[in-house]
Structure formats: C-alpha cells, structure tokens
Amino acid sequence: MSTLRGTIIAAHGRHYIAQAGAERLQCVTRGKKSHVAVGDMVDLKKTSGDQAVIERVAERKTLLYRSDQYKSKFLAANVDQILIMVATEPGFTEDLVSRALVAATAAGAQARLLLNKTDVEAGLQKARERVARYAQLGYPVHELSVRAYPEQAVALLAPLLAGHTSILIGQSGMGKSSLVNLLVPDADIAVREISEALDTGKHTTTFTRLYQLNDDTAIIDSPGFQEFGLHHLTEGMLERAFPEFAPALGKCRFTNCHHVAEPDCAVLEAVRRGEISQARHGLYLQLRHESMQTIGYG
C-alpha cells in the first residue's frame, strides 16, 4: 500500500489517531519504542481500512515535553504558542506556571497567560497581582471569562490563535475544557469518538487532543496536571530560558559560571540589585539541581 502523510491528533500510551486528509486512522509504531507526539507530521502505511503503522516522523519545529529523572512525557510537537490558563478560583500554582514559561522559552515558543473567571470579583485583584509578575517579564497576559462572557472570549482569542498551533496548559479547574468547548463546538463528540478509538473508556481527559480550527490554525488540549518536570533541560538551556537573565549572561568573571555562589557573577549581582527576583533565581537553582540528578545503580 502507498504511504500517506498525516498529523497525529490524539495519543494514549502507544496508540495514536492520525488525520490523513479526510481519513482518521488508528495507528501504532513499529517495535516497542514510541517517540511520537500529538502534532507530529508522520508518514503512514495503511494495514486495513482504518488502521495504519507509523513509518516515519517528520522533522519537528518544536517539541514540548516534561520529564523527571525516570521518564519523559511528550506534550506536543510543532507547537509555536503555549497558552497557560490560570483562574481567579481555584488558586493556581505559581511553580507550574513558572515551569511552563521556562519550557516555552526553552522550546522557542511564544507563551501567553490566560487569566480566566474574571467575573469572580472576590479573587480578581489578587490573581491580577500574581500574574502581573509574569507580565513584567514580557509574557503577555490576557483576561477573559469563558462562561460569563463567551463572545468576548472568542473575540479576544481569535486573532491570538490565528495562524498558530497552540497548546493549552493548566491545572484542573482552570476552565480549559470550557474554553475548548467554546472554540470547538463539536469537541465533546470528538473526544468521545477518540476515546472509543483509543480504548480509554470514560477517561476522556487522559489524552492530549489536537483540534484543527482551520487550514493554518490548531489548538491542542492537554490533560490537567499538577507538576511540570524539566529534567531534560541542560544548565545552558536553563539560563537562556529566563529572559531576565539575558542582560547579565556573558558578563560573569568565569566563562563557565553556574550563577550559584561564584564571585563576580553578573546574575547574582542582578539578583542583589533586584533586577532578577529571588523567587525566579530560586526556581533556576531548583531546576538546575533537578537536571543534575541521575538514577543511582547498585
């Protein structure tokens, strides 16, 4: 059979769904290893009417994933925009937001924060103060209320999404599902169909799913999660993933400075002057420590 080119639109374990033109195919990889992500462009060989084998993964523009010292978990490929959803309630975790921003910058993707549920006035001021710290670092923050003001939310997001492949990231309860259902009217039906095809039963939120909004615009919905490990980022990748470090990089006394406790470290000097916050430098130290951990044997 001839080879088809398709896009991976859903993944669960080692089972995938690919969209190849008008066809939707259930796919597996050859062998036991699977290094395929939602958003990947793949070459497929059909094995039956609605099934295929993934022969090759095309070169990626970007790859977003989270990892600890034991395993890695692909989030999405070929994403150029990361939308981090937070809300006035329930409270969001600063650590998750900060790590997602580092991951976005390291992957070369635009990151934006979406502050949802702005109609909940009791928590609005505090939430605004919390996200303002990220706005000061140059990350755009957009306010919306998906359920209370759906038309305004669509009007706000439409130009931001146009021409991009975006991934939606956030903890459970931030309103991601409501937003996807607003942007993709048939999302619930699509999720049920994909869930049955992937044999995930009722666990419809356990897989990542790509929705093609038009020819050049797509949005990827990821499952809600509480932790975002970045074990795969090297020290050099980490220091460049903090935009506020940029003016200081290359100005330390030592060319191999780790920005931990070295004398005449330009980054530490910037921390002392308040140009880099203690919290952000602390996150850098934590991520650096994590990336240095290796699995012990024996």
Image: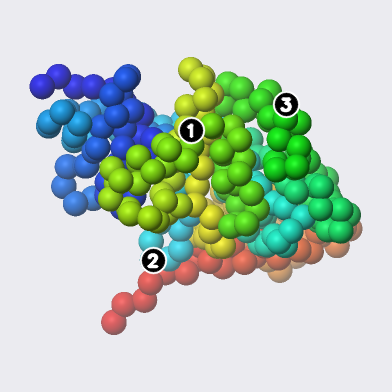
Which amino acid type corresponds to the residue marked 1 in the rendered image? Answer: Asp
For the residues carrying marks 1 and 2, which lies nearer the camera in this image?
A: 1
> Which numbered disc flags the more N-terminal residue, 1 or 2?
2
Residue 16 visible in the shown view = yes
**Badge 2: residue crowd in 10 Å (few <14, some 14–19, many ≥20):** few
> Which numbered disc flags the more N-terminal residue, 2 or 3?
2
> Which numbered disc flags the more N-terminal residue, 3 or 1?
3
Q: CA distance from mark 1 to mark 2?
A: 37 Å
The residue under the point 51% across, 28% down is 218
The residue under the point 15% across, 28% down is 49
Numbered disc 2: secondary structure: loop
**Badge 1: residue crowd in 10 Å (few <14, some 14–19, many ≥20):** few
Which amino acid type corresponds to the residue marked 3 in the rendered image? Answer: Ala
Label 3: which residue? 155
For the residues carrying marks 2 and 3, which lies nearer the camera in this image?
A: 3
Q: Identify the image quadrant of residue 112.
A: top right
Q: CA distance from mark 3 to mark 1?
A: 19 Å
Residue 23 position, x and y percent, is 28, 24
Residue 102 position, x and y percent, is 62, 50
As drawn, the label of residue 186 is 1
Which amino acid type corresponds to the residue marked 2 in the rendered image? Answer: Tyr
Label 2: which residue? 70
